Image (cartoon, rainbow, N blue to C red):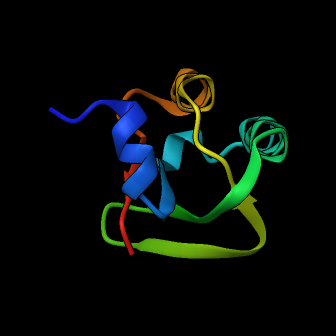
Amino acid sequence: IILFSKIKDIAHNLHIDIKQEELKEKNLLRLKELLSSHKGKHALYLHLNLSQDEKIIIRSKTMKMGFSDSLISEVENLIGTHSVWLGEE
């Protein structure tokens, strides 16, 4: 197990997995609000599960993210547990 305080020093990307049932306008608008309030220097990847067989991964060109426990907690409360992870290049 790696402490969050350590992983955020080596991670470069924020990934968010959004299941089909969570792809609702109100959820996406709230997610945009949350992400906009945690700006930083790290790339953002959205993994959109459109169906059982179709998944799209989008790298944001306009948003760079900061990592925090509160951001991860708020996003997971909105779209589900284990929907957020930090990754290296």
Q: Horizontally, is 27 left or right of 55 in the view? A: right
Residue lying at 41% horizontally and 62% vertically, measured from the top left: 51
Circle count: 0
- Image spot of residue 46 (x, y percent): 56, 62
Q: Is residue 84 above or below residue 75?
A: below
The quarter of the rendered structure image containing the C terminus is bottom left
Q: Name the residue rendered at 77%, 36% in the picture.
A: 34
| Left-right relation of 38 to 55 | right
Please report the residue visible at 62 percent of the width from the left and 47 percent of the height from the top: 23
In the image, farthest residue toward the left: 1
Inspect this view and state whether residue 49 appears.
Answer: no
Task: Determine whether, in the image, residue 60 is placed left or right of residue 45.
Answer: right
Residue 19: image location, x then y, percent: 46, 47
3 or 76: nearer the viewer: 3
Measuring from the top left, give residue 36's x and y in whole percent.
84, 46
Viewer-proximal residue among 68 and 50: 68
On the image, which quarter does residue 3 sit in? top left
Please indicate, yes or no, whether residue 67 appears anywhere in the rendered image.
Answer: yes
* Residue 77 vertical position relative to residue 21 in the rendered view, above or below: above
Quadrant location of the N terminus in the rendered image: top left
Query: Percent from the top left, x then y, of residue 47?
Result: 48, 62
